[in-house]
């Protein structure tokens, strides 16, 4: 299980994201740049114990209307080869030393654990406490199995609506970046999807809502 250290980070995560978000195609931008606050999230465990995996939900109140974003992050003790384009920044961790923070949608360790989460083979962990599951993160899967899907060789594409993780056989794991609360009474799983995961967050006004974080779409039939 991942160990949550109570220590300092320089710069802090929100400080890194304030500089990084404006470069993302799914961030609409604001006149004065992001004004961020933590709104929720959870963690996943790396079975090798090498990579920190965190799904941060952040709110941005810089625009005319508050926005909420999902930012999957990985934390590594050394640079990830070939992932320079996905580097969010580096931090000095009070216990672990220098850490390289990456957009997790471009890190095969995070993507592998995310597919395991959707399939039900792993459980989400509390964002702030070691060895405590987070039951508020829910998932479903109705496909034939993801274990044989080679998401390690996926193609990750950032676009205006989020990030598409496309497997070689055509299945797409679509990660929502700009989050929206699910309307009461409506199903979270879109028509035609074979899996999803969802979770809650706190709005800038202090309310508690939940919505879809990612959806699994099957490969097109030929």
Image: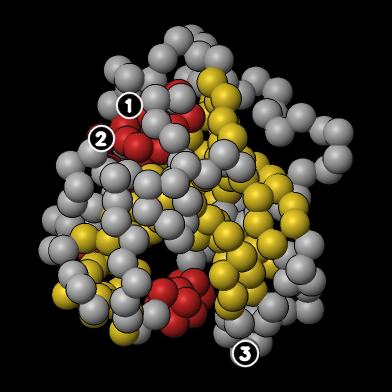
Circles 1, 2 touching at the beta carbon (< 8 Å): yes
**Image quadrant where residue 46 sits:** top left
Q: Mark 2 or mark 3: name the one nearer the start of the chain.
A: 3
Residue 82 image offset from top left, x and y in percent: 18, 55
Label 3 environment density (alpha carbons within 10 Å; few <14, some 14–19, many ≥20): few
Considering depth in this image, is 218 or 47 the residue closer to the camera? 47
What residue is pinned by disc 2?
A: 153
3 with respect to 55 (left or right): left
What residue is pinned by disc 3?
A: 32
Q: Residue at (47%, 51%) from the top-left corner?
A: 126
What is the CA distance from the residue labelled 1 to the residue labelled 3?
40 Å
Q: Residue at (39%, 31%) from the top-left corner?
A: 122
56 with respect to 7 (left or right): right
What residue is pinned by disc 1?
A: 168
**Image quadrant where residue 119 sits:** top left
Considering depth in this image, is 170 or 60 the residue closer to the camera? 60
Q: Mark 1 or mark 2: name the one nearer the start of the chain.
A: 2
Q: Mark 1 or mark 3: name the one nearer the start of the chain.
A: 3
What is the CA distance from the residue labelled 2 to the residue labelled 3?
38 Å
Residue 34 image offset from top left, x and y in percent: 58, 80
63 with respect to 26 (left or right): right
């Amino acid at each position: 299980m991942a160990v949550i250290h109570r220590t300092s980070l320089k710069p802090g995560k929100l400080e890194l994201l304030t500089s990084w978000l404006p470069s993302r195609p799914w961030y609409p931008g604001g006149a004065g740049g992001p004004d961020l606050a933590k709104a929720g999230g959870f963690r996943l465990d790396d079975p090798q114990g090498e990579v920190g995996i965190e799904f941060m939900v952040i709110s941005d109140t810089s625009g005319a209307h508050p926005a909420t974003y999902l930012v999957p992050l990985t934390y590594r003790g050394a640079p990830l080869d070939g992932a320079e384009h996905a580097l969010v920044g580096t931090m000095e961790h009070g216990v672990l030393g220098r850490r390289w923070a990456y957009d997790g949608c471009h890190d095969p360790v995070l993507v592998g654990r995310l597919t395991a989460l959707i399939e039900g083979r792993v459980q989400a962990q509390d964002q702030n406490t070691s060895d405590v599951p987070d039951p508020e993160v829910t998932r479903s899967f109705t496909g034939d199995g993801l274990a044989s899907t080679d998401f390690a060789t996926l193609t990750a594409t950032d676009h205006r609506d989020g990030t598409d993780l496309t497997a070689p056989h055509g299945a797409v794991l679509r990660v929502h970046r700009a989050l929206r609360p699910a309307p009461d009474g409506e199903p979270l799983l879109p028509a035609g999807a074979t899996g999803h995961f969802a979770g809650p967050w706190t709005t800038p006004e202090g309310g508690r809502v939940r919505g879809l974080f990612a959806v699994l779409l099957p490969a097109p039939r030929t």
